Amino acid sequence: MKAIWATMMATGVLMAGVGLAAAEPVELTRAAAAPKIDGVLDDAIWQAAKPWSDFLTAKPDFGKPASEKTEVYLAYDRERIYAAFRCLDSEPGRIKTSVCRRDSCDSDDWVALVLDTFDDQQSGYMFVVNPSGIQMDGMLNQDGNANGDYDMVWDSAARMNGDGYTVEMAIPFKSLRYPFRKLLTIGFGAARVISRKSEQSHFPEFRPDRGSMLAQFQRVTLREVKYERNYELLPAVTFSQSHAQRQGSWQRDSRQFDFSLTGKLGVTSDLTLDAAYNPDFSQVEADAGQIDINLRSSLYYSEKRPFFLEGKESFDMAAPMEQDPLYTVVHTRTIVDPLLGFKLTGKMGRRDMFSTIFALDEFPGQVAAEEGDEERAGRNAAFAIFRYKRALRQDSFLGGFYTGREFAGSYNRILGADGRFRLTPASILEFHAFGSLSRDQRDEKAVAGSALGVRYNYVTRAWYIEAGFNDISRDFRSDSGYVSRVGLTTLPWLFIHKIYPRSRFFQKVEPFYWGYLARDRFSGLFETGNVFVLRFSMPRQSQLRFDAILGNEVFADQRFTINAWRVMGYTQILKQLYLEASFRRGDQILYDADAPAQGKGTRASFYLTFQPTEKLSNSLAVQFTDFFRKTDDEKLFDYTILRDRLTYQFNKHLFLRAIAEYNTYYRKLNVDLLASFTYIPGTVIYVGYGSAYEKLKWRQDERDYTPDDDFLRTRGSFFFKASYLWRF
């Protein structure tokens, strides 16, 4: 979903006394009878409600009249908010749409409704529908950047017609958090994307130099909304069975049946408690393969498990920058196999927000048992995470974090603060500061560390400027987060100039410079990176980028060059065909602490999606890298991953999927088949079967497996999962 979330980016909200004064709220039309959600705007409420139609572009440029007319209607009753869109199109046959899995239609045409239910410009709920009625949803933070992981229960329908398409939405208040008042004031914004034109338009108008998207929303009032305490139960059953090759024969490897129960309680209208016993955190589809050799830090895998997704955005820390080794202090994938889980998220009052997680993880004790560590075997790691934010004026805030992981006498604890301050309508200043205290079981003393980050951001129609400071000590540790490197002090910067030529082909041209200066605390050596970029944005969701990279990096107390050139691009070249590719050639480093080396090589990726019909799609992804040592030009490795995914979507609930992934480095092929039925988020059935093949052969005379040119099936796994969401 990266395309939709990138296009919804905003830049902050106005401080009181600067920028535009907030418009007076408008009272919404109250529905005497609920509309039928069928995509046809013939209900009485849509005849009575006043449409908003002043949509102006935010992409490729700001403040231009939208090329096609859009109307949005909003209404409500005691239990739901209703929205309707009428999207006219002068070429309806060129509208791009698909019948696909939920949260997978970001490359289509679509409309979006965003609700700031607390009217505090801190976050917003986002609801997206494409012309085939497929839903996407997520949360927007202060910058308007969206996190599409969180799923909500709501209803929608869409209908194509001779002059465009129409959309209806019904959003239960039970699916939202909001302050319960007789007179409720919220902010709303609407957007429409026309894929073939690379055009995005908004109501109300969004201008980056007037603050963030959330600050510029239309404010509306609702009266006597009904509050129903939200009760949910989610029982789930999971069965899996696997077989594997052992000593030349096919043997059962494991068999497991699990029952789990997750519950949700709306403590108040804006505070939610989640609890789970033996939660089913299994992932239905395995993570896509990543190149996993010659790495300086461990691979990062995003969170996909439903229990952790609600409120996930609240754990984002302020002052994130690309060059900061501290990516996050809360990365819930570090909780691998929880026995128990508790979460409390929401607000107390208008300004105080907090999120907590407590979990017992069985995984470390399982690993200890496998390694013969009797002292730690069978013991659980305890995670305790707490996040607090105090909203200040408009989008500014001050916050704090505590994270703790305790296991068999060892621990890692982090305490710190972060904040965001609106300086002008176009600029913000953010910071984070953390201290860690860590002790391993056999150590006599605990070790302290620290991490500090500062970020300044300035955005207008013509400029994007970012500068900062990051410092992470040698002994900083975050067992609940993700850290790629320690012992580093960095000064990063970014300057982008946006040019809007009068051309139908080049919609936007962006020359920019990104760089950093860093000092490695272990060696005392300095390193620097300089990336000079020329980027072109074009119709059909197309972009082409050229990079020149000049820099060096310190590793194992030595400095190596990383000079290279790179080309990247993507395009929806046809309605049925999407292409994305990147190619980098230049200097590389062999990350071997005992024998580091200067090298050169290629990194390339290619992605293609072919959609011959609205229901059938096939995606092919290729990743490649190689490495040649510079001293003797010897090739040390090459590595390719090929992944093909074929999906047939019968309707918005049911799909069949086949995935084949081949890894040339390990000479291993994985084939996965999956059938999925999703009625609403939480009510699902999955049936899958996966097989692994390796280029091996069993040698009876040697009693061993040896390399071979043919594939041998080495593992097979059957998987079944069913869950049902009860809402009371």
Image (tube, helix red, strand yellow):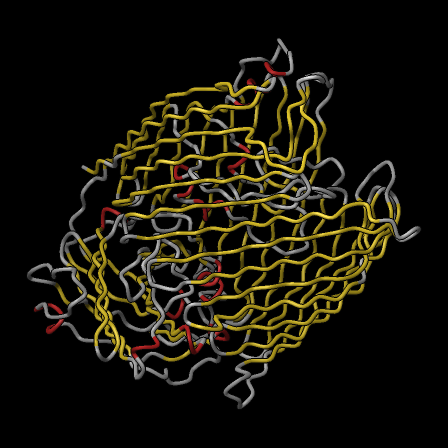
Q: In percent of the image, x 15 and y 49: which residue is there?
A: 226
In the depicted structure, whether residue 565 falls above or below residue 176: below
Q: Toward which corner of the image does residue 527 lie, by quadrant?
A: bottom right
* Quarter that holds the N terminus: bottom left
In the depicted structure, whether residue 650 falls above or below residue 386: below
* Furthest-top residue in this view: 374
Residue 123 percent location from the top left of the image: 40, 56
Q: Toward which corner of the image does residue 713 lie, by quadrant?
A: top right
Left or right: 496, with 548 as reference point: left
In the image, 4 versus 282, the foreground residue is 282
Residue 206 percent location from the top left of the image: 42, 74
* Furthest-right residue in this view: 631
Q: Toward which corner of the image does residue 604 lie, by quadrant?
A: bottom right
In the depicted structure, whether residue 640 falls above or below residue 616: above
* Quarter that holds the C terminus: top left
Q: In percent of the image, x 26 and y 40: which residue is there?
A: 268
Q: Is residue 18 visible?
A: no
Residue 17 percent location from the top left of the image: 45, 71
Residue 627 percent location from the top left of the image: 79, 50
